[in-house]
Image (cartoon, grey):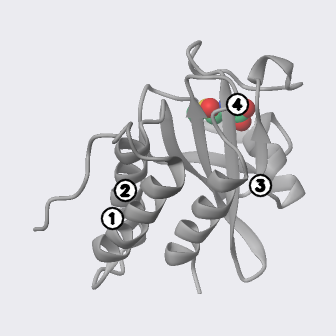
Amino acid sequence: MTEYLTIPDTTASKEERYSQLFPQIEGLIMGENDLIANLSNCIAAIHLTMGFLWTGIYFVRGNELVLGPFQGPVACTRIRKGRGVCGKAWEQQKTIIVEDVSTFDDHISCSSLSRSEIVVPVFGNGEVVWVLDIDGAELAAFDGTDAEWLEKIMRLIEPR
Ligand code: SME
């Protein structure tokens, strides 16, 4: 198996790191159609290449989100629709970027080290089927560049 990048290259810009990450993820999922296998490798590649605090999936299960593949500290397993950043991104069907989680009403804290967050909803048949949730250890770790690339990466795996 090809060896993939696993250490954040702190000399590279965010844009450069995502540009390198994207074809790696295309390669990782090529020829494999199992969703959990593909999401698991995708999460590991994003997490290690970008050096995030927590990177993972919450699947829509009925009226709740349920924890899926992730990398990082242990996390809460269930989040109700509309609760936390994840539940709001699901409800509003749009990517949410939180520069400072301490100012976000109803933020659900899984790690005291988390300072900022991005949540990207992913669609199948027009409905949100899971959200990609990422926590950063620094304030304002995420911006439009992250949203654009993470949405693009999720489109590689989203159900068709
Ligand atoms: N902070 C999230 C909960 C999940 S953890 O960050 C892994 C939220 O407010 O929805």
Q: Is residue 124 above or below residue 101?
A: below
Query: Which residue was labeled with disc 1?
Result: 37
Dot 1 crowding, Cα within 10 Å, few <14, some 14–19, many 20+:
few
Q: Are marks 1 and 4 in contact (CB under 8 Å)?
A: no
SS at mark 2?
helix
Residue closest to the eye, 1 or 33: 1
Instruction: Give me the disc on residue 45.
Output: none
Residue closest to the eye, 150 or 9: 9
Place of residue 131 in the rendered image (x, y in percent of width and height, measured from the top left) = 65, 55
Query: Which residue was labeled with disc 4?
Result: 140
First in sequence: mark 1 vs mark 3: 1
The answer to whether one can see residue 80 in this image is no
Three-letter amino acid code of the residue under disc 3? Thr
Residue closest to the eye, 68 or 16: 16
Q: Are marks 2 and 1 in contact (CB under 8 Å)?
A: yes
Instruction: Give me the disc on residue 40.
Output: 2
Real-space CA distance between mark 1 and mark 4, rounded to the nearest whole angstrom: 30 Å
Q: Are marks 1 and 3 in contact (CB under 8 Å)?
A: no
Real-space CA distance between mark 3 and mark 2, rounded to the nearest whole angstrom: 21 Å
